[in-house]
Image: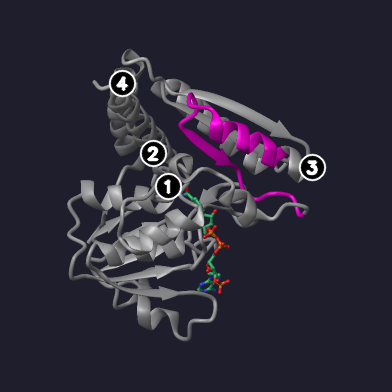
Amino acid sequence: MTARIIDGNALSARVRGEIAVRAAALTARGVQPCLAVMLVGADPASAVYVRNKVTACEKAGIRSLRFDYPQDADPAEVMSRLAALNADPAVHGILVQLPLPPQFDEAAVLEAIDIRKDVDGFHAENVGRLSQNRESFIPCTPHGVMKMLETVDVKVAGTEAVVIGRSNIVGKPMAMLLTNAGATVTVCHSRTRDLAFHTRRADILVTAIGKPRFVTGDMIKPGAVVIDVGINRLKDGPDAGKLCGDVDFESAKEVAGVITPVPGGVGPMTITMLLENTVISAERAASARDLAAGK
Ligand code: NDP
């Protein structure tokens, strides 16, 4: 059996098309969606992510503002910029690219963002709302995974789901979303004993580990849905320099029923969901404005 492959690029292009239509409608109402992106330091990967986000905004008709700070930036200066962006009604989303340099208290920075503009969904209040299954901004990568499952018609309720990884940005919110959708969820991590025992029970397996080709075909239940969040660059061997996921795609695709590739799987969906969150925020701002004006 060879798994059905979810094309994240194609899905992303379709969803971004819908987002562009919503952005244009907002602009016609006089509220162009706007995302402010802050980059602190010179981490090359972060610079690439920020550039990709800004380009994606432009293509979708979303205005973007970019604020760059050096590695030795004064946290007070960044906090003061955040306060100004919170107060600016023309800004609908604020994103601080992580990681931040060591002089920053990352949690304090994330919590300085107005929760109505927290389009990354990392503010503790949005995380709490997600855990209570209330309306919130959902972190973009796990949100993108849920969108993928929905569009390929995977019924989540009643399944056994296993998430490998317990980070705040992927693993934990992923587990909460799957729980909210009715799956029975197991969260695995580096302290898990007998990882394969868990993965072999999974109808839905999500990997967010950061270890190249770590999950092999023999660890997967036949017919399972395998979602590979990992993005790793191979250091040696014949594929040195290439990107790969946490899953050994070649052996896994012979066992799984549905699988995502890397690159071209979850990656493009992450930025797509950031655009969607920004448009949602702008739609809320436009409705609030109209309500205040008695329209
Ligand atoms: P973190 O390093 O924060 O978390 C990795 C998780 O994997 C941890 O919970 C860790 O366990 C667990 N882990 C590590 N080794 C093992 C092991 N041997 N067995 C079981 N679990 C293990 O990474 P992120 O969550 O930030 O990212 C994970 C991956 O996803 C990375 O490759 C990253 O590049 C990618 N990523 C992709 C995105 C996309 O858009 N597609 C967006 C964000 C991330 P413990 O907690 O015990 O240390």
Look at the picture and state if 49 lies above or below 161. above
Q: Earlier in the sequence, mark 1 or mark 2?
A: 1
Q: Secondary structure at mark 4?
A: loop
Q: Is residue 100 magenta?
A: yes
Q: Magenta span covers which residues?
A: 78-102
Of marks 2 and 3, the one in the foreground: 3
Name the residue at 27% across, 28% down.
18
x and y, in percent, of residue 199 in the image: 36, 75
Q: Is residue 126 left or right of residue 81?
A: left
Q: Secondary structure at mark 2?
A: helix
C-alpha distance separating marks 1 and 2: 8 Å
Confirm or reject: label 1 Cβ below 8 Å from ligand 1: yes
Q: Which residue is mark 2?
A: 277
Q: Disc 4 residue type? A: Ala
Q: Disc 2 residue type? A: Asn
Q: In the rendered structure, are the residues bearing label 1 and label 2 in contact, judged by CB atoms less than 8 Å apart? A: yes
C-alpha distance separating marks 3 and 4: 40 Å
Q: Earlier in the sequence, mark 4 or mark 2?
A: 2
Closest to the observer: 136 or 42?
136
Name the residue at 25% across, 69% down.
183
Q: Which colouring convention does the figure follow?
A: one colour
Of marks 3 and 1, the one in the foreground: 3
Q: Secondary structure at mark 3?
A: loop
Quarter occupied by residue 206: bottom left
